[in-house]
Image (cartoon, helix red, strand yellow):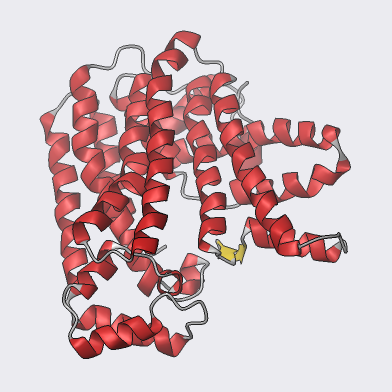
């Protein structure tokens, strides 16, 4: 099915116009095509949920806002560029298959908010809080908090099922879908392994930069950039082996740099831009590279102050500022920024090796800047 262009204000009525907009608008064209494809898929699936029962109308509404109202589309964008770079064609069918990765990301975000006990996401209540509120508004029986958590787990699972459904119903040749499934499966395994490493490191109270970098690689690095690039290449008719190698050499350092930027934003980000309270990662006690680098260099008095505030759910803005000052004073912020710069440089250098279509190279250079220079 061709995406509904009018949803995003496109006046296109033919596949030729669709391809023209994607080619000449570059990344913006790809993002718009992905948005349209997700909207078209969600329209069908929300209609089906409505037929199951009226009780599911709030589910469709919440997931629709979560999926369609915001999001960088980073993973399907990298997958689409990986597809182009490996000689794949941009068609409504390939865009639908590649866009399925956004639904994997939706699953991860919903579950992540439950694991982190996060109250907000993108400036709005997180899914589990929304359905905790619904329980209270409808005066339902039992624990409102448990209802919200159970609902969010189910909706995250539903998003993961939808991802597979969108891929299989994309209209791409079953041959190409079949050759992409090993990458798709490996990506999901690595994501779940990375998420577990993240919560384990928090419980273990690690102060190891090396261990924290491993979490960054598996929780976000591979799943956000390397594997989407591989997935896009695997959906192309005949991607050469060197393309996968180049994508790894580019995607792994950039993926880690992307996660390190996330870690910096989680501590120093502006709530108006992040949609989350200031210093949220400090409240949650996230054991990131930034925190490990800080704890490796603190004085005894700084460590005492750090341990007084770090990981406290009721941490106020004064406590956030105290922790931020210690992070800066120990040089941890400067070291992480230097690491981000080094990793981004290595990613750019990987593209010199060749084997990738020139248009894709140009877009990957642009995406590297977008992934590491962002503020939210």
Answer with the quarter of the image where residue 373 lies: bottom left
Q: Which residue is drawn at 60% across and 44% down?
A: 156
As drawn, is 376 to the left or to the right of 211?
Answer: right
List x then y, in percent, for residue 141. 86, 60
From this view, report whether residue 263 is shown above or below residue 277: above
Report the front residue among 285 and 16. 285
Q: Is residue 213 visible?
A: yes
Answer with the quarter of the image where residue 205 lies: bottom left
List x then y, in percent, for residue 242. 18, 22
Picture mark count: 0
From this view, report whether residue 317 is shown above or below residue 97: below
List x then y, in percent, for residue 160. 56, 36
As drawn, is 107 to the left or to the right of 374?
Answer: right
As drawn, is 367 to the left or to the right of 10?
Answer: left
Quadrant of the image containing the N terminus: top right
List x then y, in percent, for residue 262. 36, 60
Q: Residue at x 38, y 55 (%)?
A: 200
């Amino acid at each position: 099915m061709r995406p509904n262009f009018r949803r995003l204000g496109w006046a296109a009525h033919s596949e030729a116009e669709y391809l023209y907009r994607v080619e000449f608008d570059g990344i913006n064209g790809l993002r718009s095509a992905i948005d349209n494809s997700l909207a078209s898929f969600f329209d069908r699936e929300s209609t089906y949920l409505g037929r199951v029962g009226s009780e599911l109308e709030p589910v469709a509404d919440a997931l629709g806002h979560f999926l369609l109202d915001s999001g960088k589309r980073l993973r399907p964008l990298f997958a689409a560029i990986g597809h182009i770079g490996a000689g794949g064609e941009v068609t409504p069918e390939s865009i639908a298959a590649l866009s399925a990765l956004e639904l994997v990301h939706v699953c991860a975000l919903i579950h992540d908010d439950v694991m982190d006990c996060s109250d907000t996401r993108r400036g709005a209540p997180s899914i589990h809080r929304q359905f905790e509120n619904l329980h209270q508004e409808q005066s339902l029986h039992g624990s409102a908090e448990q209802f919200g958590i159970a609902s969010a787990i189910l909706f995250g699972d539903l998003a993961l099922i939808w991802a597979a459904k969108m891929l299989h119903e994309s209209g791409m040749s079953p041959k190409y879908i079949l050759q992409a499934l090993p990458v798709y499966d490996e990506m999901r395994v690595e994501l779940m392994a990375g998420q577990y490493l993240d919560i384990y490191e928090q419980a273990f109270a690690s102060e190891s930069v090396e261990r924290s970098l491993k979490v960054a690689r598996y929780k976000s690095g591979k799943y956000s950039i390397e594997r989407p690039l591989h997935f896009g290449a695997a959906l192309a008719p005949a991607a050469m082996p060197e393309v996968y190698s180049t994508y790894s050499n580019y995607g792994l350092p950039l993926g880690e740099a992307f996660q390190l930027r996330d870690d910096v934003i989680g501590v120093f980000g502006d709530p108006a831009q992040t949609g989350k309270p200031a210093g949220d990662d400090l409240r949650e006690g996230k054991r990131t590279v930034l925190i490990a680098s800080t704890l490796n260099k603190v004085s005894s008095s700084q460590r005492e102050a750090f341990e007084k505030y770090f990981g406290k759910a009721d941490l106020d803005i004064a406590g956030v500022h105290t922790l931020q000052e210690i992070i800066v004073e120990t040089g941890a912020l400067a070291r992480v920024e230097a690491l981000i710069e080094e990793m981004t440089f290595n990613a750019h250098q990987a593209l010199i090796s060749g084997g990738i279509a020139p248009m894709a190279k140009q877009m990957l250079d642009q995406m590297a800047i977008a992934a590491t220079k962002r503020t939210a």
